[in-house]
């Protein structure tokens, strides 16, 4: 049974979309540029750069674009190559592009068993554009093809009057309620919840979906992580086009996967020096185990649902893999090594602050 060695968050540089959701973080920052992802390296070269041997084991790679991930016709062939290498892959999509899902049905059983689709349920946009039936038909197409999936909604204030309607259509089409994430405002330095409601009110309103994803995200959303975090070694954030990778979304730059492709990759942990106000995507990084002493549900728990007919959203192979933790394939550092890393981080932070002060005085 495969166990996860590393989690790799892969950014796809498509910043255009066939939807215009008001809560979209790309729209918030006015970053839509109609730019589609285009591979600067062959999919075979990317496979070599992210080989099992180079990464040290079987990894989970999440493919997510700034806009709609599957607009580019290069994504699915690349994902196939990555799974052929032996990894597991997850794709974030709005679920509207029927031809892409038909393409997935034509993949081999093995590829489909190691693939997971995160369907983003953009209810108001689907309703405006008449895409609700198409969305659920595509979800059903994946289920019939034994591809693991989840259906997740972003709980914006504009959706509150439609909650009963959303629940009803989910039970009709899925036999289960959709999962619920948290709408965030990336324009704020503290990455606040994007809502007029207090956080307690927000949790009460959306907690009625009984979503394990929402429960966990709510429990960690405003908590500054001070524990020793292995992001930077057990997980990385990768810009797939440029090849640059970092410890996390705004962690230290570590290198480029396309440089010296025959040599091992450089990894370096964040430790106790997380730059973020809170781990807003801890539903993946933390449940997979970047902070091993945290007692969290498995990633599978946050993604799965059992339907009214007894079927599940996760297929056996994917469920087993998502239930594994990074600590099962990696060794923790000694307390001495952790202390040295923390001391070095504090020193570097002090030097940076001193440099910033000097720059202001010039």
Image (spheres, helix red, strand yellow):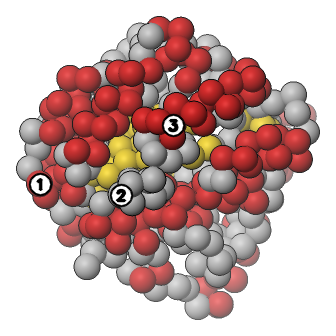
Which residue is at 53% across, 9% downward?
Answer: 128
Relative to 106, 136 lies left or right: right
Q: Is residue 258 above or below residue 37?
A: below
Calculate the distance from the C-alpha at mark 2 to the C-alpha at mark 3. 15 Å
Residue 276 position (above or below residue 201): below
Circle nearer the N terminus (3, 1): 1
Which residue position holds label 1?
Answer: 109
x, y percentage for residue 185? Answer: 73, 31
Residue 296, above or below 220: below
- Callout 2: few (<14), some (14-19), or many (20+) C-alpha neighbours within 10 Å? few
Answer whether residue 323 is visible to the viewer in this image.
yes
The residue that mark 3 highlights is: 170
Q: Is residue 87 above or below residue 330?
A: above
**Label number found at residue 311:** 2
Taking 166 as reference, is 223 left or right? right
Mark 2 or mark 1, earlier in chain: 1
Tag shown at residue 255: none
| Left or right of residue 5, residue 290 in this image | right
Give the spatial CA distance, label 2 vs label 1: 19 Å
């Amino acid at each position: 049974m495969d166990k996860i060695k590393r989690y790799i968050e892969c950014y796809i540089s498509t910043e255009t979309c066939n939807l215009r959701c008001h809560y979209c973080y790309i729209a918030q920052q006015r970053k839509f540029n109609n730019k589609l992802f285009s591979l600067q390296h062959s999919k075979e070269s990317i496979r070599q750069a992210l080989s099992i041997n180079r990464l040290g084991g079987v990894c989970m790679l999440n493919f997510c674009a700034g806009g709609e991930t599957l607009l580019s016709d290069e994504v699915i062939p690349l994902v196939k190559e990555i799974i052929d290498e032996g990894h597991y892959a997850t794709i974030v999509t709005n679920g509207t592009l029927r031809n892409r899902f038909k393409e997935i049905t034509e993949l081999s059983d093995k590829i489909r068993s190691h693939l997971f689709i995160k369907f983003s349920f953009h209810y108001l946009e689907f309703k405006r554009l008449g895409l609700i039936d198409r969305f659920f038909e595509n979800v059903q197409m994946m289920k019939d093809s034994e591809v693991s999936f989840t259906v997740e909604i972003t709980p914006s204030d504009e959706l509150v009057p439609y909650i009963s309607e959303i629940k009803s259509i989910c039970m009709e089409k899925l036999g289960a309620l959709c999962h619920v994430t948290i709408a965030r405002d990336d324009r704020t330095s503290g990455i606040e919840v994007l809502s007029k409601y207090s956080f307690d009110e927000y949790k009460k309103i959306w907690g009625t979906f009984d979503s394990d994803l929402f429960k966990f995200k709510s429990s960690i959303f405003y908590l500054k992580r001070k524990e020793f975090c292995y992001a930077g070694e057990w997980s990385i954030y990768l810009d797939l086009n440029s090849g640059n990778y970092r410890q996390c979304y705004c962690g230290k730059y570590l290198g480029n996967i396309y440089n010296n492709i025959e040599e091992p990759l450089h990894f370096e942990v964040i430790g106790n020096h997380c730059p973020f106000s809170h781990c807003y995507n801890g539903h993946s990084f933390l449940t997979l185990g970047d902070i091993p002493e945290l007692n969290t549900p498995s990633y599978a728990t946050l993604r799965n649902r059992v339907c009214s007919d007894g079927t599940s959203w996760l297929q056996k192979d994917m469920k087993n893999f998502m239930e594994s933790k990074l600590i099962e394939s990696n060794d923790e550092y000694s307390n001495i090594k952790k202390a040295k890393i923390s001391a070095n981080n504090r020193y570097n932070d002090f030097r940076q602050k001193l440099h910033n002060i000097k720059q202001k005085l010039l």
